[in-house]
């Protein structure tokens, strides 16, 4: 305890009063906020004053910048949405790697054996011929003069040659020369006249094939000469020698072309085939025309399954159909389905004749396989393409179809 010194009065300490409530005057808070706002406004105003531009220009630039930022944000959002949509489409896309028979681009490429055969350069001899076209009568005369240095086909080192002459616009009309025995340099001196319209000159070839005659076996092809008439000056008589080329193992008869589109929809299991048109079809009637119609057939596991057909187009070699057919085919079935497109000539009296056909599936090849693969790779999108018709017997041999497909009856 402290005692006061002598002569000083005694003072008691006065205790400080504690406020039970911490009250703040509203005027002081408002003053604080207003002072902070004033400082920020003054700071922004100071920055704007330093920019050597009028205020309206500054505000305009600010608005443009804000607009560009918003535009960039919108573009980013759109890109993200598009990527998500494409991912969804990729999930639906049929992966060709999962399809049986492993459809790959290597199957579309030419066969190595075929390339090697085409590169073989075997000399087969020469042929002398002449070509004359009569524009008034619309007739062409092909004369087979003689051949020289023909390839020996018999064991005795000789051949028994004769020549077949025809035009590709109508391969039913073929003419033959006489057979010349045991010679490699026959003199034929035979001529043949064919009816040929001027409108057909553009797409017609004259073919001269020399065969070796065999009495007890199939005649062997020595070689051939093919002349594309549109490349020849038919205003004058043409006479020349030409070397024989290797004749194809199968007669290349021009049956025509057909165009159709394919579309497969995996979600609904629908195969949509649209037969569009055909052109340059083979003449099947005596008047030089045909009455074509198209059959669309499906085979499942090499067994005939479903079939539909178009209407008949009268007296034309270039019919336009534009008819659509829809088939129910599941994703599992599409891997084992053969699509067969065949063109027929309708005949009221006699039996309908088949002009040609083509088939598409995972086991097809070349152009047909490419079209089928494009359809599977782009679901819901129609893919159209032209195809050359092939002889029916050739396609049927490859397909090797069995009897009609029969589904097992449900047990009752």
Image: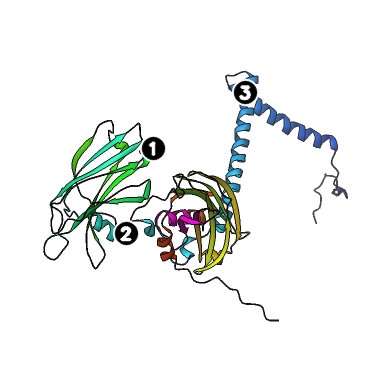
**Residue 347 pos. (x, y %):** 53, 53
- Is 14 inside the magenta-drawn segment? no
Quadrant where the C terminus sits is bottom right
Q: Residue furthest left?
A: 156
Which residue is nearer to you in this view: 82 or 8?
82
**Which sits earlier in the primary sequence, circle 1 or circle 3?**
3
Q: Residue furthest bottom?
A: 412
- Is 369 inside the magenta-drawn segment? yes
Q: Which mark is residue 58?
A: 3
Which residue is nearer to you in this view: 241 or 112?
241
Under circle 1, the secondary element is loop
Q: Residues within 10 Å of mark 3 (few under 14, many from 20)?
A: few
The residues colored magenta run 342-371
Q: Nearer the viewer, mark 2 or mark 3?
A: 2
Under circle 3, the secondary element is helix
Left or right for 18, reference 174: right
Q: Which mark is residue 197?
A: 1
**Residue 120 pos. (x, y %):** 20, 56
Q: Which mark is residue 32?
A: none
Q: Which mark is residue 111?
A: 2
């Amino acid at each position: 305890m402290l005692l006061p010194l002598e002569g000083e009065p005694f003072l008691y300490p006065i205790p400080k009063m504690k406020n039970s409530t911490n009250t703040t005057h509203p005027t002081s808070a408002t003053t604080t906020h207003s002072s902070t706002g004033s400082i920020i406004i003054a700071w922004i105003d100071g920055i704007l004053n330093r920019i050597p531009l009028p205020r309206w220009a500054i505000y305009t630039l600010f608005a443009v910048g804000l607009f560009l930022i918003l535009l960039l944000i919108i573009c980013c959002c759109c890109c993200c949405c598009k990527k998500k949509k494409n991912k969804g489409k990729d999930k639906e896309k049929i992966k060709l790697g999962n399809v049986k028979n492993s459809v790959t681009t290597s199957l579309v490429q030419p066969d190595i054996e075929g390339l090697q055969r085409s590169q073989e350069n075997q000399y087969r001899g020469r042929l002398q011929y002449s070509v004359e076209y009569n524009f008034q009568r619309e007739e062409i005369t092909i004369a087979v003069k003689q051949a020289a240095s023909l390839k020996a086909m018999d064991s005795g080192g000789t051949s028994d040659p004769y020549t077949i002459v025809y035009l590709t616009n109508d391969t039913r009309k073929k003419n033959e020369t006489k057979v010349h025995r045991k010679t490699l340099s026959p003199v034929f001196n035979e001529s043949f006249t064919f009816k040929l319209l001027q409108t057909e000159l553009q797409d017609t070839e004259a073919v001269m094939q020399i065969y070796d005659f065999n009495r007890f076996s199939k005649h062997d092809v020595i070689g051939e000469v093919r002349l594309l008439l549109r490349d020849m000056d038919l205003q004058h008589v043409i006479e020349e020698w030409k070397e024989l080329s290797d004749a194809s193992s199968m007669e290349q008869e021009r049956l025509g072309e057909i165009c159709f589109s394919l579309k497969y929809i995996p979600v609904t299991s629908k195969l949509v085939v649209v037969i569009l048109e055909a052109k340059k079809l083979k003449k099947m009637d005596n008047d030089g025309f045909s009455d074509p119609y198209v059959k669309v057939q499906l085979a499942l596991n090499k067994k005939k399954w479903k079939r539909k057909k178009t209407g008949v187009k009268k007296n034309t070699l270039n019919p336009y159909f534009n008819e659509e057919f829809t088939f129910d085919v599941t994703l599992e079935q599409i891997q084992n389905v053969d699509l067969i497109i065949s063109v027929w000539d309708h005949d009221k009296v006699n039996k309908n004749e088949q002009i040609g056909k083509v088939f598409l599936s995972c086991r097809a090849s070349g152009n047909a396989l490419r079209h089928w693969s494009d359809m599977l790779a782009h679901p819901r999108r129609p893919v159209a393409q032209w195809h050359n018709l092939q002889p029916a017997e050739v396609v049927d041999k490859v397909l090797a179809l069995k009897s009609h497909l029969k589904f097992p009856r449900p047990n009752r």
